[in-house]
Amino acid sequence: MNTPELRIRDLTMTHGRRPAVHHLSFALKPGAMMAVVGPNGAGKSSLLRAIAGLHAPSEGRIEGLSPGCIALLPQQSALDRAFPLSCRDAVLFGLWGESGAFRATPRPERVEGALDAVGLHGFGRRPVGSLSAGQFQRLLFARLLLQDAPVILLDEPFNALDARTSADLLAVMRRWHGEGRSILAVLHDIDLVRREFPETLLLAREGIACGPTEVALSAENRLRARMMSEAWAEQAEICDQAAA
């Protein structure tokens, strides 16, 4: 797996001039498995969207990207499940950005293999709207499998899932990690992060810590993140440093 090093340099992002991420710098090494942890509103989802090319930074750079190297799993709440698609078409739709209308469609066995790998054997013709929350998340993981990207971004991949589904999808993530892919995942379960993720970025709009998980999630760092979140002014304009 030819996995690039992803470098975030002095990244600043805003929503309507309101601060989302401030002057963030870190590196995601090839084959890394890194969690992104922080309070609600800390800029975690915005960071993933910026890396995926869906949110333009106000300042700073994202280096190491190349076409097709990133695959993003957004939060389920951001997706419309009412659109009339079969599971097979939903998996194939994940390739549209790379393939467009004129590239050969992957062989059917690849799609079925991806569905099988996430526990959805025989679901190809099922309408997406008939799936439970857990089945739908499995479907999104199947789409990521077909995309075959070396860098995978996951935004709250286990939110509101039952224990069995979480365990099965975590096994898929371990497989990706074993293949040398880089994984950057927004998570809230600190016990899971400590158990499964060697590295952590602790974010509170600014980067609090990034490195070995036990160091990044020290009591001192987590207290600092909480204090920064409690001091946020939601109506604040873009910071003076970013505007200079």
Image: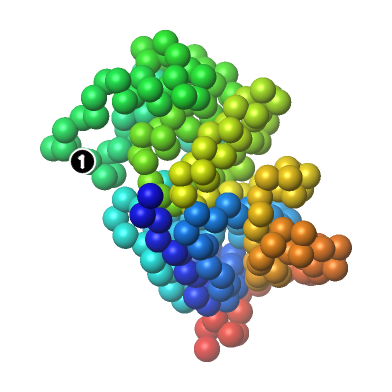
Which residue is at a point 45% across and 64% down the rendered structure image? 6
Count neighbours of disc 1 (C-alpha within 10 A) and say few if under 14, some if 14 to 19, many if 20 or more: few
Residue 52 position, x and y percent, is: 42, 55
Instruction: Name above or below for residue 149 compared with residue 26.
Output: above
Coloration of the structure image: rainbow
Q: Secondary structure at mark 1?
A: loop
Residue 33 position, x and y percent, is: 58, 52
Which residue is at a point 32% across and 32% down the rendered structure image? 93
Total numbered labels placed on residues in the image? 1
Instruction: Name above or below for residue 53 compared with residue 64.
Output: above
Residue at the left extreme of this rendering:
102
Residue 223 position, x and y percent, is: 84, 65
Q: Amino acid at mark 1?
A: Gly
Q: Is residue 83 visible?
A: no
Q: Is residue 207 visible?
A: yes
Q: Is residue 152 left or right of residue 77?
A: left
Q: Say which quarter of the image contains residue 196.
A: top right
Which residue is at a point 54% across and 81% down the rendered structure image? 242
Residue 136 position, x and y percent, is: 52, 25
Q: Pick whichever, 144 or 60, lies toward us.
A: 144
Instruction: Name above or below for residue 96 compared with residue 12.
Output: above
Pointer 1: what residue?
A: 100
Which residue is at a point 67% across and 23% down the rendered structure image? 164
Residue at the bottom extreme of this rendering:
244
